[in-house]
Amino acid sequence: QKEVEQNSGPLSVPEGAIASLNCTYSDRVSQSFFWYRQYSGKSPELIMSIYSNGDKEDGRFTAQLNKASQYVSLLIRDSQPSDSATYLCAVRGYNQGGKLIFGQGTELSVKP
Amino acid sequence: DTAVSQTPKYLVTQMGNDKSIKCEQNLGHDTMYWYKQDSKKFLKIMFSYNNKELIINETVPNRFSPKSPDKAHLNLHINSLELGDSAVYFCASSLFQGLAGTSYEQYFGPGTRLTVT
């Protein structure tokens, strides 16, 4: 079992729709969770971090964390073509210092 | 203005050569990282330094040797390059995260695309 798993996609949504990206992790005591966006040929860009159960909203982005189910998701409301990118889920485990474990990424395509 | 910078951006070299990648950050962070992203876009940590001290050392061939002259700089030297070393190497930085302490966000540099022929 992979430590952090994401649907590889591609996920295709029409412009203006809600894009839902999912991530599961295997280490039950993981502490911190991050979503990065990576455009083709560019570096990962941090867009959300979440540390406790529930929802965290930032503009059009909402991160949701459910530690009991070992599940973290990212919702993008009113998706725009500029949101088309690969979204990377990253998890920091307990007693792992700064070590982040990344999922394989989900490619999102927003169609005009 | 650049937060985390890397040089060079592209590196093309032949098998068996030795090469170095440099990274610098001006964010005031004290911890820096090297990540490798393979052709399938999978991103994996290699090393981390905190204030010039190696704190994370993943299972990486000992042909790879990181060096941190100070907390704002982290270099990666690779000896005897192999075809499988071809990847994008990203440097990142953050404030220090203790084993179970506060999480700080990591910020990535632009990457160095290494191609070994």
Image (cartoon, coloured by chain):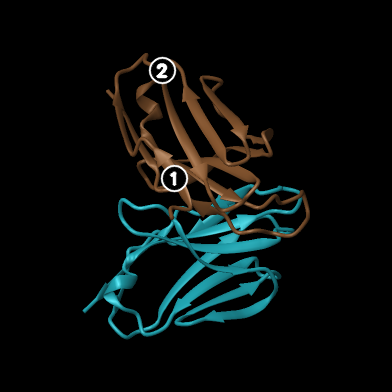
Chain colours: A cyan, B brown
**Of label 1 and label 2, which has the lower sequence position?**
1
Q: Do labels 1 and 2 share a chain?
A: yes
**Mark 2, secondary structure of its residue:** loop
Q: Is residue A20 left or right of residue A15?
A: right
**Chain to which the residue tagged by mark 1 belongs:** B
Q: Residue B18 carries which label?
A: 2
Q: Residue at x 46, y 34 (%)?
A: B22
Identify the residue at the far front of this view: B1
What is the three-letter code of the residue carrying label 1? Ser
- Please give the count of numbered marks on the rendered protein: 2
Observer-side mark, 1 or 2, equals 1
Q: Residue B5 carries which label?
A: 1
Q: Residue B28 location, x and y as percent?
A: 61, 51
What is the three-letter code of the residue carrying label 2? Asp
**Chain to which the residue tagged by mark 2 belongs:** B
Foreground residue among B108 and A40: B108
Q: Residue B9 location, x and y as percent?
A: 34, 39
